[in-house]
């Protein structure tokens, strides 16, 4: 009878050890899988952010060129071409903006939204030939982009290197709560 109990206890102990080992192995695999998924997400976010930076710079510069060419009484024939280029550059930015927001934190999303609003208004100023407004928005877009960079670094878990830039209403989204 003792042999039966000893065998049963040994069998139960072996089963518990096997289950515990399987549990720990699965837990370790899930941890590795989560780390790999976060790594892939961060890599995709970096690539998208890189493309967004290029697109926003091109949009700012194209809008500024279009505004300068469209202002005044002596509007050249190339003004319509520059407006079309500014619109195309802005559309490329909007595409990257939407891609970035798929993996963005709420803070990044709000900062990207602020940048988008500034670039939207900058394009409108360019289309209307308002060089002064476009130049002011050009500088404001830089501040909005730097705020986005700050929240991007925070999303990746890196040290934030710069202070937040204040944006005037209606562009400030992160601190105003208005979206």
Image: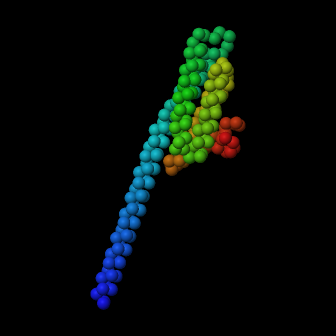
Which quadrant is home to the N terminus? bottom left
Q: Is residue 161 above or below residue 15?
A: above
Instruction: Give 65 or 40, whichever is nearer the viewer.
Output: 40
Residue at (62% x, 18% y) in the render: 68
Work out which residue is located at the far left of the displayed protein and give it: 3
From where the camera sits, is residue 62 visible?
no
* Residue 72, quarter of picture: top right
Q: Is residue 172 above or below residue 132?
A: below
Residue 15 visible to the viewer: yes
Of 2 and 132, the residue lying toward us? 2
Residue 42 placed where, x, y %?
46, 45
Foreground residue, 43 or 135? 43
Residue 105 placement (x, y as % from top left) = 56, 46
Among all residues in the image, which is located at the extreme right?
169
- Residue 144: which quarter of the image? top right
Residue 82 locus on image (x, y percent)? 57, 17
The residue under the point 43% across, 50% down is 37
Residue situated furthest bottom in the rendering: 1
Q: Quadrant of the C terminus?
A: top right
Q: Residue placed at 63% from the left, 29% from the top? A: 120
Q: Residue at x 61, y 30 (%)?
A: 119
Compared with residue 71, is residue 45 higher up or lower down, i.e. above or below? below
Q: Residue 158 at what x, y percent from top left? A: 50, 48
- Left/right placement of residue 151 relative to residue 6 reads right
Residue nearest the viewer, comparing 8 with 95: 8
């Amino acid at each position: 009878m003792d042999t039966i109990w000893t065998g049963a206890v040994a069998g139960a102990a072996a089963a518990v050890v096997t289950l515990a080992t399987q549990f720990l192995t699965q837990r370790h695999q899930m941890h590795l899988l989560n780390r790999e998924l976060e790594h892939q997400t961060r890599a995709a976010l970096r690539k998208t952010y890189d493309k967004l930076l290029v697109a926003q710079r091109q949009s700012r510069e194209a809008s500024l060129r279009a505004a300068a060419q469209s202002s005044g009484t002596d509007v050249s024939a190339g003004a319509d071409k520059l407006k079309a280029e500014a619109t195309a550059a802005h559309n490329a930015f909007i595409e990257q903006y939407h891609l970035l927001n798929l993996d963005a934190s709420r803070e990044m999303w709000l900062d990207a939204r602020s940048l988008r609003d500034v670039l939207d208004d900058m394009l409108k100023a360019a289309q209307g030939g308002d060089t002064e407004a476009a130049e002011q928005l050009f500088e404001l877009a830089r501040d909005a982009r730097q705020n986005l960079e700050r929240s991007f670094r925070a999303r990746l878990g890196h040290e934030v290197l710069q202070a937040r830039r204040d944006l005037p209403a209606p562009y400030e989204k992160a601190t105003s709560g208005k979206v």
